[in-house]
Image (tube, coloured by chain):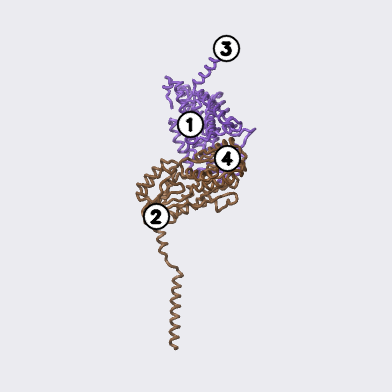
Chain colours: A brown, B purple
Amino acid sequence: MKIKILVQALAAAVAIAVGLSVAHAQDKGLENPRSTTFHTALKDKKVVFVPLSMGFDLTEGWAAQMKKQAARLGYSFEIRDPAWSTDAGTKAIQSLISEKPDLMVVHNPDIQSYARLLKQAQAAGIKVIQINLESNTTTDSYVGADWTEIGEKAAEAIVDKCDAGKGISTKVAIDTGVPTAASDVFQLDGIYKVLDAHPAIQVVSQQATEYNPEKARSIMATVLQQHGDLCGAIGIWDNQDTGTASAIKEAGKSDQVFLVTSGGGNQVGCENVKNGLFNLYISYNVPLQGDLLNQEIARLLMSDSPAGEVKTMYFNPLTLITKDNVNQRNCWTLDDLK
Amino acid sequence: MSSAAGREAGSKAWVERLLRSQEGIVFLLALVAFVVFSVLLPSFLSAGNLLVLVRSVSILGILALGMALVVIARGIDVSMIAVMVVSVSWAFVITRAGYPFEIALLIGAGFALLAGVGIGTLIAFGDVPPIFATLAAGSVIYGTGRTFFFTLEMQNVPPDTDWFRLIGQGSLFGIPITIIAFAVLCIVMQLVLSRTRFGWTTYAMGNNPNTARVTGLPTRLMVVAQYAISAFIAYLAGLILASSAAAINARLFNSTMIYDILLVVVLGGIGLNGGHGSVRNVVLGTVFVGILLNGMTILNIDYTIQNLVKGVVLLLAIVVDSLVNPRDEQTSQQGDL
């Protein structure tokens, strides 16, 4: 009996000792093989970014974030800047097809120009992510705004203020950018889907500004001369609509004309919301897009499936910024991202 | 009866005289466009709209004044937009870095002048043809700006500079300051061209550069001065533009703005082979382009069609001009640009 107890006690002691020693081993943690793989798998990979142009908030923001991840995971990251020239962009992609990087991040100037090249690139084994401006071709991934949704949101806000009996009139002006860009074609579709359901709304002017704030200003000044009772305006990009807004302010109609615009959520745009130039600022949130982009880059580089086999896309959520929620969380500066 | 016939003949002669010059043709076209728009568009003729009309092209007009000075001396300056966006953007960046706004503006002006003097030196002492010199200099200036002075193309006017906003957004006796600035610059330029030795020398250089040089005029220094002035005018135009839109976008360098300036100058009747034209031509060209743009905006004409109309009008003016004023021996000897 006594021996049995002794054996039991001994067994318990051994068990505790073993347990302790295991516990001791756990103190230094366990090696996670996946972590090692994650941090080393991308070492020799090459990623190239072909933006519309560097030098504006969106592309600088994405590039800053992509650079950060490239440094963290040790792959090489390059930018080929075509400086707003579709021609230069086409040549850049053509030469990339023969250089064969592992992945290209492409920002399309319009829905047509790069479409075939992107197909060729994937056929050559290069994975392709499209960022924020789509082409007609679907590729391995698209990350960015749903322009149709932005158009609908903008038009809904306008209908809310300017539908029959709600505003000073039912007159609305639309300032577009460049007529062939995805941001224009899809956004206009979204806008008119909503406006067509509200026949009282009159679109009195729809003019292209070529993203130029001064041109946007003089167009809005002319429109306000013709239609002093304009109720609302939809602009296609915050960078150009500082001009639209200053024409409205100059005419002393800031309280009358409801201006909706959209952009990447840069602090500069937010300042314009704060000082009352933009009434509604639909942000597609560049820091969020940068994070999504990085996730997609890592996923595609690690995946063994060949380029163009699985096509995915994700329209990131939009933030509707008004005077009530202009804050640190919704607005960013380039230095924050670097 | 005879007096009526005389009057008719007189008015006929008047029209013929008008048709004999490019300037006259454009004047008639402008008049026709003005009358048509006034009849078709109910609020085209309102005072408010006419102010908006002139204002929307005032900046273009100011730039065209600088271009005109260079073109009259048989040069051309396609670097104006580069100088404009880089010097103004840089001034804003310096301000945001903590320097007083006024000093930053002076630095911007200094940069513009330096660029102009550099280009002028290249042309006057390096004997580089103006079109190549300014085309290359434009890229160099823009590249320097984008590489060393600022990363972002879009520069908002720095905060707490309310007086600066007045330039582009304020008005005096109901007339926007932008228009007043254009008018004042027109008067100054007219006086310089018609009343000063500098102006006469400019015409002489345009008429016949070799004779001007042989006669002993300081043509090289004049060239440097002309490009410095056009660069400085570009800077002034940039300030007004930034002030009125509350921001400046360096991307204008890639736009067709420089061709719009040339359009104004050529349409107004200042020949690219130099020696002719005055401020009157710039005003005419500016107002004509203004009428077209304003009318088409009110009519809500599609972007592509607007560009088409602009192109067709320019072609029309050139074709009619060469029909009415056929090439003669002198022009073929001088050659066009």
Q: Name which residue type carries label 2.
A: Leu
| Residue B198 visible, this angle | no
Secondary structure at numbered mark 3? helix
Return the x and y of residue B7 as percentages of the image width and height: 56, 15
Which mark is drawn over residue B3?
Answer: 3
Q: Is residue B151 left or right of residue B164?
A: left
Q: Chain of mark 4?
A: A
In contact (CB < 8 Å): disc 2 and disc 3: no
For the residues labelled 4 and 2, the Cα–Cα distance comes to 50 Å
Secondary structure at numbered mark 4? strand
Total marks drawn? 4
Residue found 46% across the figure and 36% down from its top: B137
* B313, B256: nearer the viewer: B313
In contact (CB < 8 Å): disc 4 and disc 3: no
Q: Name which residue type carries label 3.
A: Ser
Question: Mark 1 highlights which residue?
Answer: B309
The residue sitting at the bottom extreme is: A1
Q: Which corner quadrant of the image does residue B61 belong to?
A: top right
* A178, B41: nearer the viewer: B41
Q: Nearer the viewer, mark 4 or mark 2?
A: 4
For the residues labelled 1 and 2, the Cα–Cα distance comes to 50 Å
Q: Name which residue type carries label 4.
A: Lys
| Mark 4 residue crowding within 10 angstroms, few (<14) / some (14–19) / many (20+) | many
Question: Mark 2 highlights which residue?
Answer: A301
Question: Mark 4 highlights which residue?
Answer: A171
* Mark 3 / mark 1, whichever is N-terminal: 3
